Amino acid sequence: MPRRQAGKVIDLLLAGRRLLDQTRLPHPEHVIDFGSARSVLRALWSEVMAALGASEGSPSRDLVTLLQAIKELDEQLLLDHLAHQDQALQRVRAALAHLGEARTSAALLDTAAATACGLGFDRSIVSRVADSLWIPERVHVAKDPAWAGEILELGRTHPQTLDGRLVESEMVRRRTSLLVDQVQERPGVNKPIADASMSRSYCAAPIVVHGVVAGFVHADCYYQQRNVDPLDRQLVTLYAQALGQALTRTMVLDEMDLVRADVERLSQRISDAREGNLGDGWWGHGDGEGVTAGTPPRGVEGYLRSVPDDPSLTRREVEVLRLMAGGDTNARIATRLVISEGTVKSHVKHILRKLGAANRAEAVSHWLRSGYDRAGHGPSRPTAPR
């Protein structure tokens, strides 16, 4: 709530503490948001009414004046709270419209944290969940981008395991949002981020993609010097749900772009063939990648690209297998191929079954050996980059 309104509530509370038994009244620090402010006013109202009822003779003018002021301020707070909620819903609509404009997953994630702050928050973090690790991907602090970079660096340097000890584990287990207060004193928070951000309270919600918790959205109101409230939690929940739906949509668009690119490339090759311009691409080399006899592909990636394709594997499975051979994790493969981590796991399962392998290492070994056999002399050994 605005400081001016909070100040009015505290002024009335202090006036009541001067006129009444202050041990029965709330402390000014209890005035945090609209809900707590109105609760304080109700408690003050009850004590003033009790004092008036117990007084003998004519009622105290000061108490009557205080009672009238409490009533007027409470009515004003109610109107302000309703206006605040309406403004918040308008910001949600604007944020959802912005999410709908993204055409790729990368573009969506690049603006997701900043868009979350458009809901009325000062800072936000968008993270991914990979192999039970909580890894921040974007941090937005409009007033201090350098601080955002520090928080992001610490979060990535110290990824947290979601093993039940962190409060965020509940978001994965129950797919529910959180409102966390007293962050600096509370156990079970992400200590590196808590220390770096100096957050007092925050709300967070899971990003669900294809039925799986793929990440989190965190937000707080640090510069407003207020704790987040239940309305903030609802806003983050709505935003995270919309972000998950938007990611589901952009991932489909990403896949469609890949298919479109493949079709365009094939169409171009057919057109070139009709004109008699076959090029190196028809002989197993990439377009525009002329091969000089005796010149092997350079580096590990070139070595892996030179392994002949296994006819039992689909094009996408070969791409996944090459990245596996290069040491990429499922999360990294998902990022590089712009697909979900669940899709990567499905591809890996199919690869293991087709190659008769018990694990990833065995699958890579089998693929490299079989590629060597198919080539007759095997792919060129990787050469160190110069």
Image (cartoon, rainbow, N blue to C red):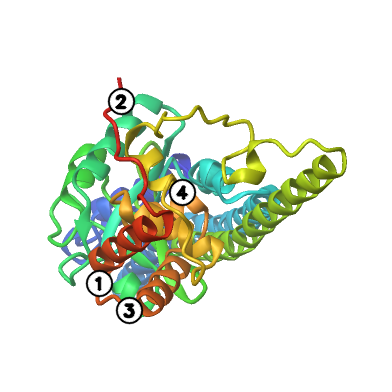
Judge the density around disc 2: few (<14), some (14-19), many (≥20) Cα neighbours within 10 Å.
few
Report the amino acid beneath label 3.
Gly
C-alpha separation, residue under disc 3 versus residue under disc 1: 9 Å
**Left or right, residue 24 beside residue 180:** left
The disc labelled 4 sits on which kind of residue? Arg
Q: What residue lies at 69% left-to-right and 52% top-to-bottom?
A: 262
Q: Quadrant of residue 314?
A: bottom right
Marker disc for residue 356 = 3
Residue found at the far right of this picture: 275
Q: CA distance from mark 1 to mark 2?
A: 30 Å
| Other residues around mark 4 within 10 Å, as few (<14) / some (14–19) / many (≥20) | few
Distance of label 2 from label 3 (alpha carbons): 34 Å
The residue at the point 77 percent across, 48 percent down is 264
Secondary structure category for the residue under label 3 = loop
User: Of discs 2 and 4, which sits in the foreground?
Assistant: 2
The three-letter amino acid code for the residue at tag 1 is Asn
Which mark is nearer the camera, 1 or 2?
2
The residue carrying mark 1 is 359
Type of amino acid under label 2:
Pro
Query: Looking at the picture, how far across and down is residue 319, in whole percent?
Result: 47, 56
Sequence-wise first label, 2 or 4: 4
Structural distance between the alpha carbons of marks 2 and 4: 22 Å
